[in-house]
Image (cartoon, rainbow, N blue to C red):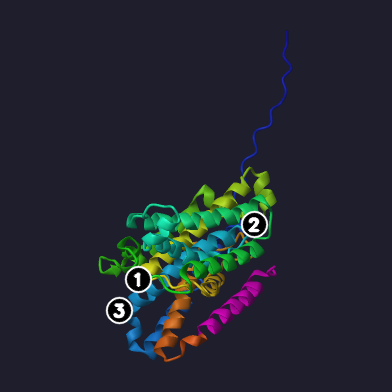
């Protein structure tokens, strides 16, 4: 019995990356370094304005003053890359340490709530837990119920800000336990611990978003959520996790600044979202999602705080800071439109 032989077609070879794809990758990598010349230029101008600018004490001061905001910028970058935005991060920045302080430093309150006295050691876990709960609730409304992320997080910003004002009575929480002040006040190897923490988190963010499957999933969702879903990415789960991680990072940043100030003001974090967006946008993170990098966002916040420091050394009043932040956002959007050729929506 003879067999019918059918010609087999050899498997098609995987085509090499096209020249345009390689060029796009090279451009993307160069875009991450786009602010480096500007940072160098500001450093030169700062040294001319005031020789103190390049002193080690002033450099550490700049890095420490930006360390908490840098973590919130990292959090916002994670959300923006997915094509969403989280305005409530600035309120989580204040509320999470505020609730921990409220429960830990007022034993009479906890007894009145029917709770045992909350040990000081629980303060940090409480801060992170509040951040996780806020992120999970945002995810419930945005992912599960399909509500508009901008409106949801704007509403949460107002709710959380009002909650902090309510539990504090509009006053400042003082006498924080050592567990809450350690990271913000400690010094490791001659450098404030908050700088080390922020740099470590930025480094982790660079690795995760740039070199892992989870990071590629975030970019895929931000680029085209339907295509990402068709490719097998669990978009809802990834978005939910991104919102939770971002809120936990914001809570940690709030813990750091509370430790540095040894207090939690009722207005902690108010207006911080303007600096966060300014740094992210100038760092090349797209408001449309799917574009940007953690390193670019970090250079954005570094440049922003360097400019603020130069203006301070030059005697410019601090009231001009918001003007600077708004101008930076507008200029960055115009530059992105010109270079990218795509309108922001």
Residue at 51% across, 59% down: 247
Q: Residue furthest top?
A: 1
The picture places residue 249, in percent across and down from the top left corner, at 46, 60
Is residue 342 found left or right of 323 in the rendered image?
A: right
Circle 3 sits in a helix, a strand or a loop, which is it? Answer: helix
Q: Which residues are magenta?
A: 321-345
Report, in whole angstroms, how far the alpha carbon at label 3 lies from the one at label 1: 21 Å
Is residue 84 found left or right of 311 in the rendered image?
A: right
Front residue of 112 and 252: 112
State the residue position of label 2. Answer: 223
Q: Earlier in the sequence, mark 3 or mark 2?
A: 3
Circle 2 sits in a helix, a strand or a loop, which is it? Answer: helix
State the residue position of label 3. Answer: 57
Is residue 190 found left or right of 338 in the rendered image?
A: left
Residue at 69% across, 28% down: 8
**Nearer to us: label 1 or label 2:** 1
Report, in whole angstroms, how far the alpha carbon at label 1 lies from the one at label 2: 42 Å
State the residue position of label 1. Answer: 262
- Quadrant assignment for the N terminus: top right
Front residue of 72 and 27: 72
Q: Earlier in the sequence, mark 3 or mark 1?
A: 3
Does the magenta-highlighted stretch encompass residue 304?
no
Q: Residue furthest left?
A: 189
Does the magenta-highlighted stretch encompass residue 328?
yes
């Amino acid at each position: 019995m003879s067999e019918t032989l059918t010609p087999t077609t050899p498997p098609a070879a995987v085509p090499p990356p096209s020249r345009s794809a390689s060029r796009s990758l090279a451009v993307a990598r160069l875009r991450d370094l786009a602010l480096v010349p500007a940072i160098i230029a500001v450093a030169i101008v700062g040294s001319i304005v005031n020789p103190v600018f390049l002193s080690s004490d002033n450099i550490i001061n700049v890095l420490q003053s930006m360390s908490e905001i840098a973590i919130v910028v990292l959090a916002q970058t994670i959300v923006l890359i997915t094509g969403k935005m989280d305005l409530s991060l600035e309120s989580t920045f204040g509320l999470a340490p505020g609730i921990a302080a409220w429960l830990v430093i007022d034993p009479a309150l906890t007894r009145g709530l029917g709770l045992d006295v909350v040990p000081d050691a629980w303060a940090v876990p409480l801060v992170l837990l509040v951040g996780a709960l806020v992120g999970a609730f945002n995810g419930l409304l945005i992912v599960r119920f399909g509500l508009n992320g901008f409106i949801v997080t704007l509403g949460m910003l107002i709710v959380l800000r009002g909650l902090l004002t309510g539990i504090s009575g509009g006053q400042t929480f003082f006498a924080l336990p050592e567990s809450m002040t350690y990271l913000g006040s400690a010094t490791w190897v001659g450098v404030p611990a908050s700088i080390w923490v922020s740099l470590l988190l930025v480094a982790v963010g660079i690795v995760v978003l740039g070199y892992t499957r989870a990071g590629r999933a975030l970019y895929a969702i931000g680029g085209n959520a339907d295509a990402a879903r068709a490719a097998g990415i669990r978009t809802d789960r990834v978005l939910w996790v991104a919102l939770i991680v971002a809120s936990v990072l914001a809570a940690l940043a709030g813990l750091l600044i509370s430790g540095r100030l040894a207090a939690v003001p009722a207005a902690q974090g108010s207006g911080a979202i303007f600096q966060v967006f300014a740094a992210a946008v100038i760092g090349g993170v797209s408001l449309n999602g799917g574009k940007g990098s953690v390193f670019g966002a970090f250079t954005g916040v570094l440049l922003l705080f360097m400019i603020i420091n130069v203006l301070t050394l030059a005697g410019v009043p601090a009231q001009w800071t918001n003007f600077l932040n708004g101008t930076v956002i507008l200029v960055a959007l115009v530059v992105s439109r010109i270079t990218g050729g795509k309108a922001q929506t």
